[in-house]
Image (cartoon, rainbow, N blue to C red):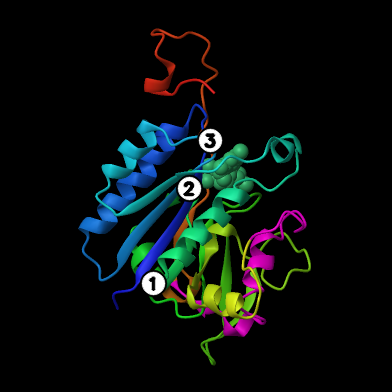
């Protein structure tokens, strides 16, 4: 296995951006150095009008090949309190994956979560649509897929939020093979996120471009019994005192 694992990461300016990206970046550096047989490719999309030096620097330090682009969320979307966040950026990331056109796996790696390096190794085994557990999603300790011991297939998606979704999976809990992008394109369909998706349905609606039923999902991470990705909400300080006037350098302010 030597497939490319495309990691799509939206990021935006806030007090905790540098600490979050440092954590994610150092995980990637470690994943690369661990020498598993995967090839990581990091796609970083800044929700901004232009790319910043500090994000580029953090990406360079990982040693992982990367693409770095700025795509700003339209103001009209930003103003809508319930609009999906990071959508334009993730879609731009999918554009890049399609343009590169090399076979691999797509994973949406938000900039503020924590990841075990084993995850990147596992992702490379995705040939269709893979699923795995995530720790600390809103309101529970974890959510994960359940595998029928007899058939070895996913039979349930265990989650606390019981909306009638086909795929009750979190953004950090699935990956898909790039051939789905090409196949949808050939059928005249854009496999992209859409603001028309209901709240909480973003993942489900994208996965429906690639799969129809739960049992066809590929369970990773020891049949979904290991958690390799966790939600993290880094708390920013309410900084009001700036010891130095150079805001950009330390990224303390919004
Ligand atoms: N994000 C962004 N622009 C925004 C808000 C969020 O690009 O205005 C990115 C953020 O950096 C993260 C992803 O979108 O990579 C998901 O955002 P967040 O973690 O805040 O969402 P949550 O996981 O809390 O729903």
> x%, y% of residue 47?
54, 39
Helix, strand or loop status at disc 3: loop
Above or below: residue 158 compared with residue 55: below
**Residue range corresponding to the magenta coloring:** 193-220
x 68%, y 48%: residue: 84
Q: CA distance from mark 1 to mark 3?
A: 27 Å
Label ID, residue 48: 3
- Is residue 95 magenta-colored? no
- Residue carrying label 1: 102
182 or 140: which is nearer to us?
Answer: 182
Can residue 116 be seen here? The reply is no
153 or 206: which is nearer to us?
Answer: 206
Give yes or no for contact between labels 1 and 2 (Cβ–Cβ under 8 Å). no
Choose mark 2 or mark 3, whichever is in front.
Answer: 3
Give yes or no for contact between labels 2 and 3 (Cβ–Cβ under 8 Å). no
> x%, y% of residue 180?
54, 76
- Is residue 195 magenta-colored? yes
- Residue carrying label 2: 113
- Picture quarter with ligand 1: top right
Choose mark 1 or mark 2, whichever is in front.
Answer: 1
x 51%, y 87%: residue: 152
Q: Earlier in the sequence, mark 1 or mark 3?
A: 3
Q: Residues within 10 Å of mark 2 (few under 14, many from 20)?
A: some
């Amino acid at each position: 296995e030597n497939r490319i694992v495309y990691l799509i990461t939206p990021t935006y300016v806030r007090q905790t951006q540098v600490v979050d990206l440092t954590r994610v970046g150092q995980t990637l550096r470690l994943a690369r150095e661990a020498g598993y047989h995967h090839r990581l490719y990091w796609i970083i999309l800044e929700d901004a009008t232009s790319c910043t030096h500090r994000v580029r620097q953090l990406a360079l330090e990982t040693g992982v090949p990367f693409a770095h682009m700025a795509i700003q969320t339209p103001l009209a979307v930003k103003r809508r309190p319930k609009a999906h966040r990071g959508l334009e950026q993730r879609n731009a990331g999918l554009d890049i994956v399609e343009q590169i056109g090399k076979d691999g796996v797509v994973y949406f790696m938000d900039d503020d979560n924590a990841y075990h390096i084993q995850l990147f190794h596992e992702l490379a085994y995705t040939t269709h649509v893979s699923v795995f557990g995530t720790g600390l999603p809103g309101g529970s300790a974890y959510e994960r897929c359940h595998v029928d011991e007899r058939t070895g297939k996913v039979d349930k998606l265990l989650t606390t939020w019981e909306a009638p979704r086909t795929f009750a999976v979190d953004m950090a809990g699935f990956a898909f093979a790039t051939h789905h992008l090409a196949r949808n394109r050939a059928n005249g369909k854009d496999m992209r996120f859409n603001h028309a998706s209901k709240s909480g349905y973003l993942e489900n609606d994208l996965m429906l471009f690639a799969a129809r039923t739960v049992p066809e999902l590929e369970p990773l991470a020891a049949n979904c019994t290991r958690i390799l990705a966790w939600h993290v909400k880094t708390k920013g300080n309410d900084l009001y005192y700036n010891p130095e006037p150079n805001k950009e350098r330390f990224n303390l302010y919004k």
